Amino acid sequence: MTTPETPTDPTRTPHTFKEGSHGFQWGLAIALAMVVVITAAVAWWLGSSNQLGGTLWVLTAMPESGLEIEGLTVTAAFTDDEIGGQAPVNSYGGEYSAGGTVFKVGEVARTLMAGSDEAMAVEDAYFEALSAATAYVYDGDTLTLLDPDGAQLLVFRRAE
């Protein structure tokens, strides 16, 4: 048995769903709702996991630099999206983001005072490590900034 062929109208585009199809409308509504919920959940997770906002830290070690920091003070104060503080010689500030374990500092501005060769070497190494940090570990009293391979770049203790 053969079926007669239906002539095709070249001006009409074939469609899968009937116009006004409730199944299509419900499917579209559910898909949009899922996108909204997933987007909100990711935004909440990234935003709420930033535990650094409102904290102040004092640098205790720069393991990868090989430099001695004893006798030099370096601080890092965090708001929700800005970092600032005092390096051995200059004060500094800039934007940062932290969420989950991800950490990123934007361009950092600093004052332009000069200090001893030792202090300037530590300061330069600090800013280099700060810009290289891509992750952080926070346990309440200790903040450690890590490079992409997980090496400790900067270790801070909570300021009292």
Image (cartoon, helix red, strand yellow):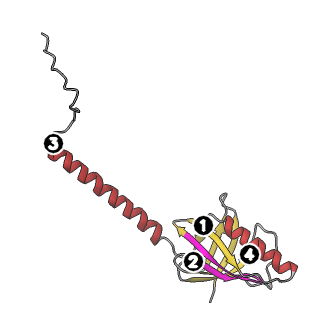
* Chain-order first, disc 4 or disc 3: 3
Residue 76 in view: no
Dot 1: within a 10 Å radius of its alpha carbon, few (fewer than 14), some, or many (20 or more) residues?
A: some
Secondary structure under badge 4?
A: strand
Q: Nearer the viewer, mark 2 or mark 4?
A: 2
Residue placed farthest to the top in the image?
Answer: 1
Secondary structure under badge 2?
A: strand
Is 68 placed above or below 4 here?
below
What residue lies at 67% left-to-right and 57% top-to-bottom?
A: 149
Question: What amino acid is found at the position of numbered circle 2 in the picture?
Answer: Glu
Question: What amino acid is found at the position of numbered circle 3 in the picture?
Answer: Glu
**CA gap, disc 4 and disc 3:** 67 Å
Q: Nearer the viewer, residue 115 or 122?
A: 115
Q: Nearer the viewer, mark 3 or mark 1?
A: 3
- What residue is pinned by disc 3? 19
Q: Quadrant of residue 129?
A: bottom right
**CA gap, disc 3 and disc 2:** 52 Å
Is 46 placed above or below 93 here?
above
Dot 3: within a 10 Å radius of its alpha carbon, few (fewer than 14), some, or many (20 or more) residues?
A: few
Q: Which residues are magenta?
A: 82-97
Q: Is residue 92 magenta?
A: yes
- What residue is pinned by disc 4? 61
Q: Is residue 30 magenta?
A: no
**CA gap, disc 4 and disc 1:** 19 Å
* Chain-order first, disc 4 or disc 1: 4
Q: Along the horizontal axis of the image, is 44 left or right of 85?
A: left
Which mark is drawn over residue 82? 2
What residue lies at 82% left-to-right and 83% top-to-bottom?
A: 114
